[in-house]
Image (cartoon, helix red, strand yellow):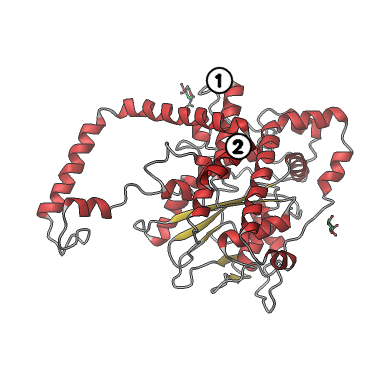
Amino acid sequence: MEKRSVEVQVGLDSDFALLLRESLAYEIKMESRSKSKLRGFIPICLLLAVGGIVYVGYFCPDHVCALTSRDSSWTDLTAKVPLQDNLGKPLMIHSNPVNLKATNPGLSYDDVFNENFQFDMNAHDVMVFLHIQKTGGTSFGRHLVQDLDLQRPCSCQRKRKRCHCFRPNRNENWLFSRYSTGWKCGLHADWTELTSCVDSELDKNEGDSVKRRYFYITLLREPISRYLSEFRHVQRGATWKNSRHFCGGRTPTHDELPQCYKGDAWLDVSLDEFAACPHNLAANRQTRMLSDLALIGCYNMSYMPSVEERNRVMLASAKKNLASMAFFGLTEHQKESQYVFEETFNLRFAVPFDQHNATVSSFTLSTLRPDQVDTIKKLNALDLELYEFARKLMYQRFARLKDRDSQFEDRFAHLGELRGRGGVELDWDKMLDEDEDTTSSAVNT
Ligand SMILES: *[C@@H]1O[C@H](CO)[C@@H](O)[C@H](O)[C@H]1NC(C)=O
Ligand SMILES: *[C@@H]1O[C@H](CO)[C@@H](O)[C@H](O)[C@H]1NC(C)=O
């Protein structure tokens, strides 16, 4: 069973395995680099650690040190203290902290699948929604807070313009997203930002002793449509300039990430201008937002001067991270996405997801000159490859879930048909204005 899925994975994308190996080599290289700097510290740390254990073991009275149980032996102690905090990393990394480098990261979803995992809302599981601009994440984000059939539905208040999505048994968030927790890790935070931030943000409210499991979810969209949609959004005044792009412990300097326009916004920019700015984050946005940017030295181009190298590592990392997400949906395939989400999390939406076939962007596409189409394809070459990878992987997951579902036909024909539900409708359009940093009241796709 497992072997077969490995073959499928490799057949899916022959470069994937190779690229992964290379990107991991970078990861390891970077680690050993920092290790040599830290070499002097290690003896001191060891000394402190041993000192601490000796203190805990011998001098600290039992009634003070709740850490140790009555018969605390050495093995007891190490077995009870987790090896490391998962620091907001996705499920895979948490569930396998020791063998991370040795395991094939592309299989982590399969591991989860084979272990027959359950998202446990009563325990410490957290769903983290990585919302990439113009992928349909706004509607999906609304569905998450408003339309899930939950034992304890999110409580949405019109005035606060937020929802509390709490666990059934206590007031702790199980959903980390714009409409529940807010943009706690920055506006449209990417993988790099979320994984270094989510855990500490939740710690602020819930204490840092909680060991949470994180289930990352995201949506991807056909890259050319997404790019054009972002272009039109920027043309109308969106900037997302409050995005932090936090990476490697800091935000990029102005030289590392120059602005494409002068003034407050890039109103009425032409498509040619938009495409010509080399620092425009719209290009390959999905790949960049899903990859571990620390691997390429964040926004510092001199860390890895070769563009080809950067691109290769970034794409491989994005594929790896996507494949290890508990769920990702495709904007073009709403129904399948809904089914995969519901089956993966064993949760049901009370409404069917809408499929918008004729989008504004496809209208724009038909009005472009052939050279413009070429340019946009080149600018988004990584995203095009990532999307192709995602499409195959999504259908693979869909097929597996379908195969084990004896009621598939019926389920699929009646997705989102749960009756008798209805809560407070939020004023979504108003919320868009406030959150999206846009001067128009454009409806976000
Ligand atoms: C960028 O990376 C180069 C090479 O690793 C390094 O020398 C330089 O200090 C970095 N720049 C910043 C602003 O960190
Ligand atoms: C979208 O396409 C599907 C299948 O091609 C069709 O059934 C549906 O009516 C279309 N929806 C809209 C809004 O055009």
**Residue at the spot x=55%, y=48% of the render?**
325
Q: How many marks?
A: 2
Judge from the rendering whether residue 239 lies leftward or rightward of residue 345; answer left or right: right
Q: Which residue is mark 1?
A: 305
Q: Is residue 249 left or right of residue 264?
A: left
Q: Quadrant of residue 138?
A: bottom right
Relative depth, front residue between 143 and 106: 106
Percent x, y of residue 299: 55, 31
- Residue 182 can be seen in this image: yes
Q: Secondary structure at mark 1?
A: loop
Mark 2–mark 1 distance (CA, rounded to whole Å): 17 Å
Which residue is rendered at x = 19% and y = 41% of the image?
48
- Give the residue pinned by disc 2: 288
Residue 183, disc: none
* Dot 1 crowding, Cα within 10 Å, few <14, some 14–19, many 20+: few
The answer to whether the residue bearing label 1 lies less than 8 angstroms from the nearest atom of ligand 1 is no
Q: Could you tell me if residue 432 is visible in this image? A: no
Q: Name the residue type under label 2.
A: Arg
Q: Residue at x 42, y 36 (%)?
A: 101
**In x, y percent, where is residue 259?**
65, 33
Q: Quadrant of residue 429?
A: bottom right
